[in-house]
Amino acid sequence: MSGLVELSINSVVGLTTPRTMKLTRKILGHQVLVMIDCGATHNFISAELAGKLALPITHTASYGVLMGTGLSVRGGGICKGVTVSLPSIDIIDDFLPLQLGCTDVILGMKWLGSLAKMQVNWEYIDHEV
């Protein structure tokens, strides 16, 4: 992989906003925090979690990761064929290892774009209490 991939500010700092969703799911039987974020270009996995689960990391050319904070960091490698178990489906996809902080896994547009055509209303309505 070469080029630049991107994470949203939500992914970087673990914010839950109306344009993200967090789920607790499993990888290899271990409970993980999964964020679905349409602001992330690719799928990411915590480098720490990848090490803990002994996931093989395939060597790649280094790539730039534009963080939602505006900073750019270098990444490298890819975890191929990782299975994330959701309630009604298993997602098998590739993930870029990166220091993620508060989130274990980010499902970004790489995965979202693979889904069948769907209609989603992401409108945010702020109701004052």
Image (cartoon, rainbow, N blue to C red):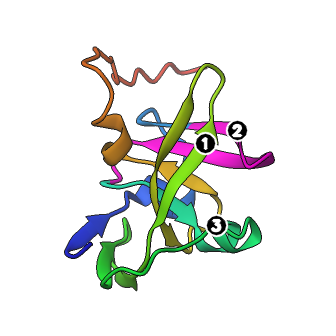
Figure check: 38 above or below 15: above
Disc 2 residue type? Arg
**Quadrant location of the C terminus in the rendered image:** top right
Is 31 magenta? The answer is yes
Position of residue 15 measured from the top left corner of the image (x, y, whole percent): 54, 50
Position of residue 85 measured from the top left corner of the image (x, y, whole percent): 65, 35
Which residue is identified by label 2?
Answer: 25
Residue at screen point 53% across, 21% down: 128
Which residue is identified by label 1?
Answer: 84
Disc 1 residue type? Val
Is 124 magenta? The answer is no
Disc 3 residue type? Leu
**Quadrant location of the N terminus in the rendered image:** bottom left
Residue nearer the viewer, 11 or 69: 11
Give the left or right position of residue 17, taking residue 109 as reference: right
Marks 1/2 in contact by CB < 8 Å: the verdict is yes
Which residue is identified by label 3?
Answer: 55
Residue 80: tell me if it is visible: yes
Residue 70: tell me if it is visible: no
Which of pointers 3 and 2 lies earlier in the amino acid sequence? Answer: 2
Q: Are there few (<14), some (14-19), or many (20+) residues within 10 Å of tag 3? A: some
Q: Are there few (<14), some (14-19), or many (20+) residues within 10 Å of tag 1? A: many
Residue at screen point 32% across, 85% down: 62
Q: Residue furthest left?
A: 3
Which of pointers 1 and 2 lies earlier in the amino acid sequence? Answer: 2
Tell me the CA gap for discs 1 and 2: 7 Å
Q: Which residues are magenta?
A: 22-40
Give the left or right position of residue 86, taking residue 1 as reference: right
Residue at screen point 33% across, 22% down: 123
Q: Secondary structure at mark 2?
A: strand
Tell me the CA gap for discs 3 and 2: 17 Å
